[in-house]
Image: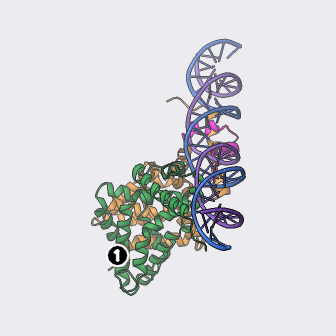
Chain colours: A orange, B green, C purple, D blue
DNA sequence: GAGGAATGCGGACCATTGGTCCGGATAATG
DNA sequence: CATTATCCGGACCAATGGTCCGCATTCCTC
């Protein structure tokens, strides 16, 4: 693999930053990739060459935002990492997810909307789902773990998060998620 | 209110039937309203005049399919109606919803996709959500009932349903939903 | 059954937008 | 500075949700 050319790197960052800005400005409203390109001071072709499609752009942005969490989950010895008791791993993970969703509502919404076709194809979703499935299977072997994992991830649906946070902020989201998870996992 | 003209009624039915056919044929793939109009033997304008938008079409179709359930839930003295114990009302309702979702996977998926903008605007969703919220509040007053109701409805996400049913059929869906609900409601 | 008003029809038309393409520009290399 | 591989940009394309209006159909009244 040859090194990324300087202009390519510069443009990639410009596009990502422009997307963030537009997400912040437009909130849940949809915006076109023309706008992204214009904001980034770049041609439309560049956006598509880099990210392949609208979906690719948001997937990459989400992956970037989720990187820290992914690392925390994979590092042994930490509160969320392998070795910790599964129950607290799961609750902790959901808490972090709530934090992440709260700080990136617009991104979450855009990402879902764009991945509606087959969300199971998105790497980040798949990773989260796999993680939760394993934990649920360990804690409540009597449940359909895969199904329960999807159900838990559904709690972070962009519209739902926005709706809940509009009246109660991140605090309410975090508490509601936790209560539901506790109820589901049993004592 | 003046009576619906004969040709209007005929065309409305033709469009609904055409939509059903296309849903059955195309499955989860998206199809255009041009196709619907062509299949119905009708002009595109007719489709839009009747239903207002793509969303309106699927909303009306869903409402039609959900009519029987809505009636069951509202009729006192029946298993799901007012007067029955809340817990069995809730579990029964979810069971019926699973049945409905299983028989209309493509419609559920299309409906969600189209209502992604603001699903809380869809009358059917709102009705279901209200019903569940009331029941949850009665059974588990300690939970955030509105949030829990959204979470329960998320179990019928079109893609999730399709995924679960692909390996286990309606039976697995029904069982998984029930297990999760039981776990959530407590003993 | 005839006449006229009200309503509905249909498909040409529009605007938006995701995605493609290629001639020209730019950056790495030596 | 020359060479070459890579990248850029915006014109272009196709699909599609939605609009519009001249014409046809239906319905009501007499």
Residue nearer the viewer, A76 or D16: D16
Question: Residue B12's spot in the image, x, y percent?
Answer: 52, 61
Question: Residue B143's spot in the image, x, y percent?
Answer: 45, 78
In the rendered image, the quadrant that contains the C terminus of chain B is bottom left
Among the 4 quarters of the image, the one containing residue D1: top right
Residue A42 is a magenta residue: yes
Residue nearer the viewer, D26 or A27: D26
Against A90, is B142 above or below? below
Question: Residue A78's spot in the image, x, y percent?
Answer: 42, 58
Q: Is residue A24 left or right of residue A87?
A: right
Question: Residue A84's spot in the image, x, y percent?
Answer: 37, 61
Residue nearer the viewer, A16 or B165: B165
Chain of the residue that carries numbered disc 1 in the rendered image = B
Tell me what residue is drawn at x 41 percent, y 51 percent: B27
Q: Is residue D10 left or right of residue A71?
A: right
Q: Which residue is mark 1?
A: B92
Q: Which range is magenta?
A: A30-52
Tell me what residue is drawn at x 50 percent, y 65 percent: B60
Against A34, is A81 above or below? below
Among the 4 quarters of the image, the one containing residue B109: bottom left
Q: Is residue B44 visible?
A: yes
In the rendered image, the quadrant that contains the N terminus of chain B is bottom right
Residue B58 is a magenta residue: no
């Amino acid at each position: 693999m040859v090194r990324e050319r300087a202009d390519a790197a510069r443009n990639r960052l410009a596009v990502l930053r422009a997307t963030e800005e537009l997400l912040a400005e437009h909130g849940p409203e949809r915006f076109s990739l023309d706008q992204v390109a214009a904001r980034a001071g770049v041609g439309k072709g560049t956006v598509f060459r880099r990210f392949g499609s609208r979906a690719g752009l948001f997937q990459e942005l989400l992956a970037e935002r989720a990187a820290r969490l992914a690392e925390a989950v994979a590092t042994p010895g930490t509160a969320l990492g392998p070795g910790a008791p599964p129950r607290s791993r799961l609750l902790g993970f959901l808490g972090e997810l709530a934090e992440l969703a709260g700080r990136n509502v617009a991104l979450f919404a855009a990402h879902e909307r764009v991945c509606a076709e087959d969300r199971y194809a998105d790497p980040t979703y798949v990773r989260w789902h796999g993680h939760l499935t394993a934990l649920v299977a360990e804690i409540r072997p009597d449940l359909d773990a895969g199904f329960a994992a999807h159900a838990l991830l559904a709690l972070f649906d962009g519209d739902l998060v926005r709706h809940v946070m509009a009246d109660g902020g991140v605090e309410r989201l975090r508490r509601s998620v936790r209560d539901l998870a506790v109820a589901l996992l049993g004592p």
